[in-house]
Image: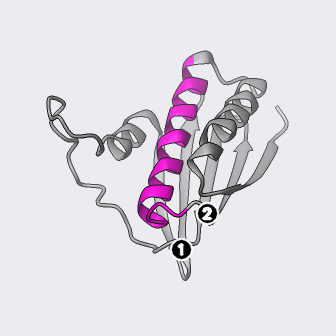
Amino acid sequence: MIAAELHLDLQSDPAAIAPARRTVEEFAARHDFGERAVADIGLCLNEALANIIRHAYEGRTDRPIALHCHAGDDALTVTLRDWGNGRLPDLRRQPPDPTALHPGGLGLPCLKQLLDSLEFLPQPDGMLLKMIRRRR
């Protein structure tokens, strides 16, 4: 298989999440990722973008997000670059009580469970998130 690349320049508008998700899911499917992997990749991208908008940009809808995908022989790598506040999430945080009546807190546990690798790489002016999903 020949490696392939996808680049998208997004705005931190929640309306940009669904089209980006569809584009990345189609990219993954074209590069021989199975139905389950494609769904997992789409869900993880959705959660990661929502977290960038909510936490890094504190809800601002006009800030840049650079998305890059690399489909290689054994894995899909998705990187998201933001120019937000650069705060690292607490990766040790436990998921919230599923019976709780308030929303939120499930994005990071979802990413950790569905991906093979998850790295937050602080940048001088924001954050680079690297997500890897291997073919299974």
Taking the image as drawn, is residue 136 in sight?
Answer: no
Q: Earlier in the sequence, mark 2 or mark 1?
A: 2
Q: Is residue 33 above or below residue 21?
A: above
Which label is found at residue 5? none
> For the N terminus, which image quadrant?
top right
The residue range painted magenta reads 36-60
Label 2 sits on a secondary structure element that is strand
Label 1 sits on a secondary structure element that is strand
- The residue carrying mark 1 is 126
- The residue carrying mark 2 is 81
Question: Which corner quadrant of the image does residue 83 belong to?
Answer: bottom right
Question: Which corner quadrant of the image does residue 66 belong to?
Answer: bottom right
Q: Residue at x 58, y 60 (%)?
A: 61
Q: Is residue 4 above or below residue 13?
A: above
Q: What amino acid is labelled 1 in the image?
A: Gly
Out of 18 and 82, give the one closest to the viewer: 18
Please provide percent x and percent y for residue 67: 68, 53
Please provide percent x and percent y for residue 114: 43, 33
Tell me, yes or no, whether the two marked residues, 2 and 1, touch with CB atoms within 8 Å. Answer: yes
Out of 89 and 113, give the one closest to the viewer: 89
Question: Which corner quadrant of the image does residue 105 belong to?
Answer: top left
Please indicate whether residue 107 sits to the left or right of residue 29 in the image. Answer: left
Please indicate whether residue 101 sits to the left or right of residue 79 in the image. Answer: left
The residue sitting at the top extreme is 35
